[in-house]
Amino acid sequence: MLIVMQAHASEEQVRAVCEKIESVGLKAHSIPGAQRTAIGITGNQGIVEIGLEEMAGVQEVICVSKPYKLVSRDVKEENTVITFPGTDTTIGGKELAVIAGPCAIESREQAFKIAEQVAKAGARFFRGGAYKPRTSPYAFQGMGEAGLQIMAEIRERFGMLIVTEAMDYESLEQVEKYADVIQIGARNMQNYSLLKRAGRARRPVLLKRGMSATLEEFLMAAEYVMSEGNYQVILCERGVRTFADHTRNTLDLSIVPAVHRLSHLPILVDPSHGTGKRTKVLPLSRAAVAVGADGLIVEVHHDPDRALSDGPQSIYPDQFAELMREVGAIAPIIGRSMAAPVAAVAGASR
């Protein structure tokens, strides 16, 4: 169910409604909007008869038929914009968010070299894996906390925000300490205990679509995070598994407008995992922005032929700079903008 408060409802009235909901063993989710506050109710199996309609400040009580409630535009009509205290960087606003960096942190020298070049090109977020879920148990599994510490240094030096993946409870605790955004990978999209733990984290969560997930399953995974009280969720399309063999996955760009129609959450596109082919990253990045994606997450490596993970889909830094120019030309046509490159990064490598 959804409680829509009046535009002039006070904080005390909102709090009173939440307390009334929780007094009967249900969970209240107060989500402020541009014009009014909405309060979602979870834990109920049907209509809640506790006299909410008569409470001060309540405009109406709506029965939400969709299985996902907090994710839905029914609970929040305007788009969610993720903000980062102390910065002017956002995800979901007018400015396109671009996340770039290697698949995995391999060394401090490698990470700093790539960070310097993607920052110069205009990336405001740096991605890199410290914990790597690999198909083979013998493949490089990441540097762990040492990799997180390197990314924390990169944030300090270049001013970029850090996005990195958590694989389980233990790694999520570490990622929450170091990163600005916690990534939940495609393999964990339906790891419900991990999603609930991410919902109790104090960081935005970037949730990647599972390799065979439907739109409803994708949104329900986000609902798991939000139901625990973390409303800072970013969706990410990264390709689904189909019969196609000319790409690693099939990048489903049609999900971008579908998500925007049903949900207020921002959605990014990952053309690197979505194609698995370096030559396809730039054209699919252009297409993703044109179709309305709120940003991109791209793998960049200065020496991809020697990368310890996902080299074939990692683009060179000069290709990333070209990508930023091309996407920057498309953005104004659809009413979006690009961030200015981070200043004072020349000569940053040590």
Image (cartoon, grey):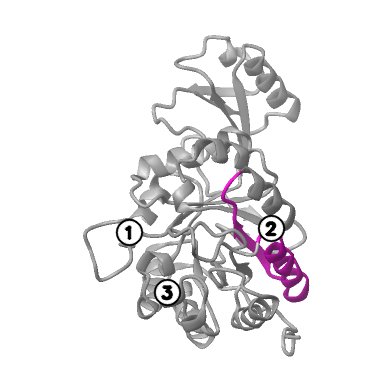
Q: Position of residue 260 (x, y in %)?
A: 42, 50
Can you see residue 284? yes
Query: Looking at the image, is mark 2 or mark 3 nearer the viewer?
Result: 3
Which residue in the protein does label 1 denote?
A: 252
How many neighbours does mark 1 have within 10 angstroms: few (below 14), some (14-19), or many (20 or more)?
Answer: some
Q: Position of residue 300 (x, y in %)?
A: 52, 77
Residue 248 appears in which quarter of the rendering?
A: bottom left
**Magenta segment:** 144-168
Q: Residue at x 65, y 76 (%)?
A: 111
Instruction: Kindly identify the amino acid type of the residue bearing the numbered disc 3.
Output: Gln
Image height of 122 relative to 169, above or below: below
- Label 3 SS: helix
How many neighbours does mark 3 have within 10 angstroms: few (below 14), some (14-19), or many (20 or more)?
Answer: many
Q: Is residue 236 left or right of residue 166?
A: left
Q: Nearer the viewer, residue 5 or 227?
A: 227
Seen as rendered, the residue at the extreme left is: 243
Q: Residue at x 51, y 56 (%)?
A: 133
Query: Looking at the image, is mark 1 or mark 3 nearer the viewer?
Result: 3
Which residue in the protein does label 3 denote?
A: 313
Q: CA distance from mark 1 to mark 2?
A: 28 Å
Q: CA distance from mark 1 to mark 3?
A: 17 Å
Which residue in the protein does label 2 denote?
A: 179
Q: CA distance from mark 2 to mark 3?
A: 24 Å
Instruction: Kindly identify the amino acid type of the residue bearing the numbered disc 2.
Output: Ala
**Disc 1 vs disc 3: Cβ atoms closer than 8 Å?**
no
Instruction: Kindly identify the amino acid type of the residue bearing the numbered disc 1.
Output: Asp
Q: Nearer the viewer, residue 170 or 211?
A: 170
- Label 1 SS: loop
